[in-house]
Amino acid sequence: MARAALVALVLLVAGTACEMDVDVTVDATSAGSGSVQVAVGFDEAALARLGDPATALATDDLAAAGWVVDPASVTPDGMTRIVATKTFDDPAGFAAAVDEVAGPAGPLTGTSLTVTDEALTYLTTLTGVVDLSAGLAPYTDPALDAAADGVPLGGLPTAVEEAEGRPVADMVDVTVTWRLDGTEVRVEPVLGAPAPPPTVLSVERPRVERRALLAAGVVAVAVVVVGAAHAIAVRRRRVGS
């Protein structure tokens, strides 16, 4: 979905003045579950070129892949917004959702969610990577080139910038929010600019079963020690008498 947003939406810029924004939100829990949400907004000019977002963004394919797609709605700032959300139950599900968002070699490559067994705790780490430094060239494919009348995607920014008199990066706003158990970091990468540093969020969750076992062991040892001390005391009293 985000790949379609970050690539296909820029195709819409060609030949028309338009503004677009893409918001990607990863919301994970220390248990390794959570959701990935992609929201795409279009101004009137972009929407006029796009048509119905529900069909232009292939929402049927998204739904088939397990994404819940909300109907397009108009926000107070006049943008028409479409939102797709997918939940995941474990780190493997998270990895699959990220691949569906950006592709296995897309701008989120390196993003991961891990849950590590640390004896008495689970350590959950969310590593978020967003790299748009190479612009659009790495994300071109034959279908998108055909949609652009055969113009390779990597060559579109120059044509768009000449037509609009401003950089493509000024027409597409991207925000990525990384969230782990309520701790949140927002990054705003710029198309063609150096990638921001990776975001790393970590949280520890106690292993209740092992702590309970440890506590039971401590109690058992204490009982043995107390019992032994009591037996020794009784024996001493008998010897003394």
Image (spheres, helix red, strand yellow):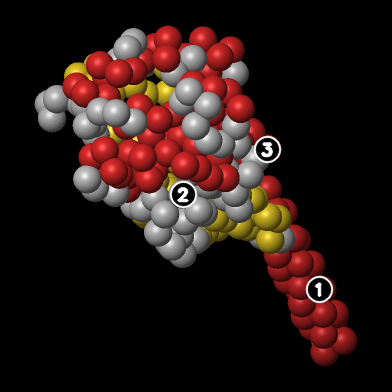
The reply, left or right, for residue 229 in relation to residue 87 is: right
Name the spot of residue 48 as percent of width and height, x first. Answer: 25, 16
Which residue is label 1 attached to?
Answer: 228
Q: Position of residue 208 (x, y in %)?
A: 62, 49
Q: Is residue 144 visible?
A: no
Up the image or down, 29 lies above or below 195; here it is above
Q: Nearer the viewer, mark 1 or mark 3?
A: 3
Observer-nearest residue: 153 or 23? 153
Q: SS for tag 2? A: loop
Q: Please provide percent x and percent y for residue 138.
A: 57, 45
Judged from this view, the residue extending furthest toward the bottom is 240
Residue placed under numbered mark 3 in the picture: 92
Instruction: Say if 142 sits above or below 239 in the image.
Output: above
* Residue type highlighted by circle 2: Gly
Indicate the amino acid at tag 1: Ala
Q: Earlier in the sequence, mark 1 or mark 3?
A: 3
Residue 220 image point, x, y percent: 75, 61
Q: What mark, if any, has residue 135 been given in the picture? A: 2
Dividing the image into 4 quarters, which one contains the C terminus? bottom right
Q: Residues within 10 Å of mark 1 (few under 14, many from 20)?
A: few
Question: Which residue is painted at 55% across and 14% down in the image?
Answer: 61
Disc 3, SS: helix
221 versus 210 height, above or below:
below
Nearest to N terminus: mark 1 or mark 2: 2
Per the rendering, the mark at residue 86 is none
Q: Is residue 82 visible?
A: yes
Q: Is disc 2 surrounded by few (<14), some (14 to 19) or many (20+) residues within 10 Å?
A: many
Residue 39 lies left or right of residue 73; in this view the side is: right
Give the camera-side residue of 11 and 212. Answer: 11
Nearest-to-viewer mark from 2 and 3: 2
